[in-house]
Structures are given as structure tokens and as C-alpha cells.
């Protein structure tokens, strides 16, 4: 799967500027709607334009694109529950096409009847399903430019004298498994340690897109639990909840991932 910096609740202010597309924030909770970049336009040669869109989308295999079509009018939607940078890059590329086509922006208030649709799905990896219950996939609060971060979180505990070796080995696993962000919080007590571990990546752009195999990563972490007497979960309740930190082992795009103190 793809981990790293994304946008859902708010637009990435000061990073992207659009002439055509409008950003519609996601709605979490019970509704759980995707965030979207949407534009409604009119073009002179719709079939030719749709062909160019299809060709463009082939370069953005991890993005979702949907078209509602009524003769020479189109509603173009780019959406997901995590809009990584490459989604916004796709929108910018589409805007270049729209300018070349002398496209006209149409008012969304005017009724629109969709006569046909085209959907270009995300290209999925074979290892999408997570087989390890100790791996949690978590978001974050808003950071720089309204960014959020999708991360792996693992809660565990172990003897304090094993902690340094365990952390070092986790760093090695990150380098093997295409993860370039690793930080943690801890709490020491009675020669023992509760840990809250976070693993993720930075901003995901078309020229540096990273995918992570959760099961391969999880298998290697599980092997370390036998080596260092690591147990999943925390001990001794809220009194020893790991709140010290974050302690950074690997980092990129820090201002988008960690809150400023």
C-alpha cells in the first residue's frame, strides 16, 4: 500500500493552485466520503479529449479518475480517501489539456444529466490485504499546508535492556521495506518499556512513488519479537502510556509529519 503525506479534510494551501478544479473535502465518520478534485467543463471535441485523458491517466496508475459525460460536457472527478501529491499532479496535467482544448468552465448549479460514464481505477498490488493484527493503519492531525500522514502504528513492550537493539533492527527493516520515516514514543518503568512505533513515508509524487508490502514488513517485525522478548500491546495501563518523544530514527519531510513543539 501507499503510506505517507496526504490531504483529506482540507486543501493543501500554498502548494497547488488550480484554474479549473475545485477541492471538496472528505467527510469522515459514518458517511466516510472521499475527498475530491472536481471540474465541470465543455470541450469542442469530447472524444478526442477523452482519449487524451485516458493516455494521461496511464501515467498515474495509482490515481482514481471518473468521467460523467453528456455530449460535449464532462464532469471530471479525481477522488480518494487519501489524496497524495500525485493526485494533485494529475489534476495539474489535466488542466494543461483543458487549456489546450479551450475548455469552458460550466456552472455546477445548472442541471446535468449523465448519458455515459468512464471510470479509470487504481492499479492495485497483489499484497493489499494486511495479515498482521498488530499492524494498525492510522492517520494524523493536520500539519503544514493542512497535510495529514498515513502511517503504520505498532504498540508493544519489551525488557529495557533489549530496546536499543530492537530499535536498531527496526531501522534496518525500514530500509529493506521501502520505509523512510520511523519514529517512536516510549515510557520506561521497572526495567521494562512500553513503545508506540510509527512507520511511514514522505510526500508521494509521481517521480518518487513508494509502495509498502505490509505482510513482508510484518513478517520481519514478528521475527524480532522472538529475538528480543517483544509483546504486542502496552503494560500497566494509562500510567505508563508511551508519551515521551517522539524519538526520530528515520525522517523525511518532517514538517509535514511531526508537529512543531
Image: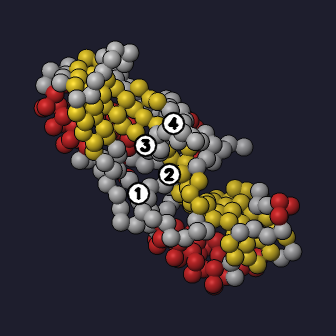
Residue drawn at the location 51% of the way across and 76% of the way down: 219
Task: Check disc 4 and report its element: helix, strand or loop.
Answer: loop
Whether residue 204 can be seen here: yes
Q: Foreground residue, 92 or 22?
A: 22
Q: Tell me the CA gap for discs 4 and 3.
A: 9 Å
Q: Foreground residue, 77 or 157?
A: 77
Whether residue 163 can be seen here: no
* Mark closer to the observer (2, 3): 3
* Mark closer to the observer (1, 4): 4
Indicate the quadrant containing the C terminus: top left, top right, bottom left or bottom right: top right
Relative image position of residue 33 (x, y in whole percent): 49, 39
Q: Residues within 10 Å of mark 2 (few under 14, many from 20)?
A: many
Q: In which quadrant of the rendered view does residue 68 lie?
A: top left
- Between disc 2 and disc 3, whose residue precedes? 2
- Between disc 4 and disc 3, whose residue precedes? 4
Q: Tell me the CA gap for discs 4 and 2.
A: 17 Å
Tag 1–tag 2 contact (CB < 8 Å): yes
* Mark closer to the observer (3, 1): 3
Q: Foreground residue, 208 or 40?
A: 40
Q: Which mark is residue 193?
A: none
Residue that label 2 marks: 4
Q: Which mark is residue 80?
A: 3
Q: Which mark is residue 26?
A: 4
- Left of 182 or right of it: where is 184? right
Residue drawn at the location 50% of the way across and 51% of the way down: 4
Relative image position of residue 90 (x, y in whole percent): 32, 38
Residue that label 1 marks: 210
Task: Check disc 3 and report its element: helix, strand or loop.
Answer: strand
Residue drawn at the location 71% of the way across and 69% of the way down: 233
- Between disc 3 and disc 1, whose residue precedes? 3
- Between disc 1 and disc 2, whose residue precedes? 2
Amino acid at each position: 500500500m501507499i503510506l505517507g503525506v496526504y490531504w483529506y479534510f482540507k486543501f493543501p494551501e500554498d502548494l497547488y493552485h488550480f484554474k479549473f478544479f475545485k477541492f471538496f473535502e472528505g467527510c469522515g465518520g459514518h458517511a466516510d466520503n472521499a475527498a475530491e478534485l472536481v471540474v465541470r467543463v465543455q470541450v469542442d471535441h469530447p472524444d478526442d479529449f477523452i482519449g487524451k485523458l485516458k493516455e494521461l491517466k496511464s501515467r498515474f496508475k495509482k490515481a482514481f479518475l471518473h468521467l460523467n459525460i453528456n455530449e460535449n460536457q464532462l464532469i471530471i472527478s479525481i477522488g480518494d480517501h487519501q489524496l497524495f501529491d500525485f493526485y494533485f499532479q494529475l489534476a495539474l496535467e489535466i488542466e494543461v489539456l483543458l487549456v489546450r482544448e479551450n475548455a469552458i468552465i460550466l456552472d455546477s448549479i445548472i442541471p446535468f444529466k449523465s448519458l455515459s460514464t468512464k471510470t479509470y481505477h487504481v492499479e492495485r498490488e497483489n499484497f493489499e490485504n494486511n495479515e498482521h493484527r498488530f499492524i494498525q493503519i492510522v492517520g494524523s492531525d493536520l500539519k503544514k499546508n493542512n497535510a495529514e500522514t498515513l502511517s503504520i502504528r505498532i504498540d508493544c513492550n519489551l525488557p529495557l535492556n533489549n530496546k536499543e537493539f530492537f530499535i536498531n533492527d527496526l531501522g534496518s527493516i525500514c530500509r529493506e521495506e521501502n520505509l523512510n520515516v520511523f519514529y517512536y514514543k516510549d515510557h520506561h518503568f521497572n526495567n521494562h518499556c512500553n513503545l508506540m512505533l510509527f512507520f511511514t513515508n514522505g510526500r508521494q509524487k509521481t517521480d518518487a512513488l513508494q509502495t509498502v508490502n505490509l505482510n513482508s514488513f510484518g513478517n520481519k517485525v514478528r521475527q524480532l519479537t522472538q529475538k528480543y522478548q517483544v509483546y504486542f500491546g502496552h503494560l500497566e495501563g494509562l500510567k505508563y502510556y508511551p508519551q515521551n518523544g517522539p524519538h526520530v530514527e528515520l525522517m523525511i519531510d518532517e514538517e509535514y509529519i511531526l508537529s512543531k513543539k
